[in-house]
């Protein structure tokens, strides 16, 4: 999926906030949760997510979703990661 297709899909699904983010190589974010639903498109590099007992590595071109409140960790690959993240806050779902 390319960036334009991803952004169009986000808008259609009520993800009105879109951010372009980066993590340096080997960065690790401890277990945490977000107050928003998230959909991500990896633009460059790779990111490993550990959530609900499963570890998955996502690479450039991959997309994935996570519901608000899901406890997870994030680790970037050796070259780092750049990703586009769509955020949908619970109150926005009913729009």
Image (cartoon, grey):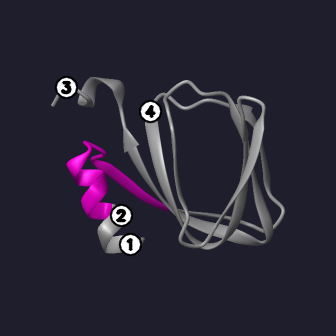
Q: Mark 4 points at which residue?
A: 36
Judge from the rendering whether residue 58 lies leftward or rightward of residue 40; answer left or right: right
The secondary element bearing badge 2 is classed as helix
Image quadrant holding the C terminus, namely: top left
> Residue extending furthest left?
95
Q: Which residue is drawn at 45% across and 48% down?
A: 39
Image quadrant holding the N terminus, namely: bottom left
Q: Nearer the viewer, residue 65 or 68?
A: 65
Dot 3: few (<14), some (14–19), or many (≥20) neighbours within 10 Å? Answer: few
User: How far separated are the C-alphas under marks 1 and 2?
Assistant: 5 Å
User: How far separated are the C-alphas under marks 4 and 2?
Assistant: 18 Å
Examine the image and state in which quarter residue 70 appears.
top right
Judge from the rendering whether residue 47 lies leftward or rightward of residue 66; answer left or right: right
Q: Are marks 1 and 2 in contact (CB under 8 Å)?
A: yes
Residue 3's disc is 1
Dot 4: few (<14), some (14–19), or many (≥20) neighbours within 10 Å? Answer: some
Q: Nearer the viewer, mark 3 or mark 4?
A: 3
The secondary element bearing badge 3 is classed as loop
Q: Nearer the viewer, residue 2 or 34?
A: 2
Q: Which of marks 1 and 4 is nearer the N terminus?
A: 1
Question: Per the image, is 53 magenta?
Answer: no
User: How far separated are the C-alphas under marks 1 and 4?
Assistant: 21 Å
Q: Name the residue under label 2.
A: 6
Residue 93: percent from left, percent from top: 26, 29
Examine the image and state in which quarter residue 3 appears.
bottom left
Q: In this view, does 53 lie above or below 38?
A: above
Q: Mark 3 points at which residue?
A: 94
Q: Is residue 63 above or below residue 92?
A: below
Q: Which residue is drawn at 55% across and 24% down?
A: 69
Q: Is residue 87 above or below residue 63?
A: above
């Amino acid at each position: 999926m390319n960036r334009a297709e991803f952004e169009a899909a986000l808008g259609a699904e009520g993800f009105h906030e879109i951010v372009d983010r980066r993590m340096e190589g080997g960065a690790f974010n401890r277990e945490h949760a977000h107050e928003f639903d998230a959909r991500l498109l990896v633009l460059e590099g790779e990111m490993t997510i550990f959530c609900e007992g499963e570890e998955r590595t996502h690479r450039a071109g991959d997309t994935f979703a996570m519901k608000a409140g899901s406890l997870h960790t994030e680790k970037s690959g050796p070259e780092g990661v750049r990703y586009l993240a769509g955020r949908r806050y619970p109150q926005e779902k009913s729009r």
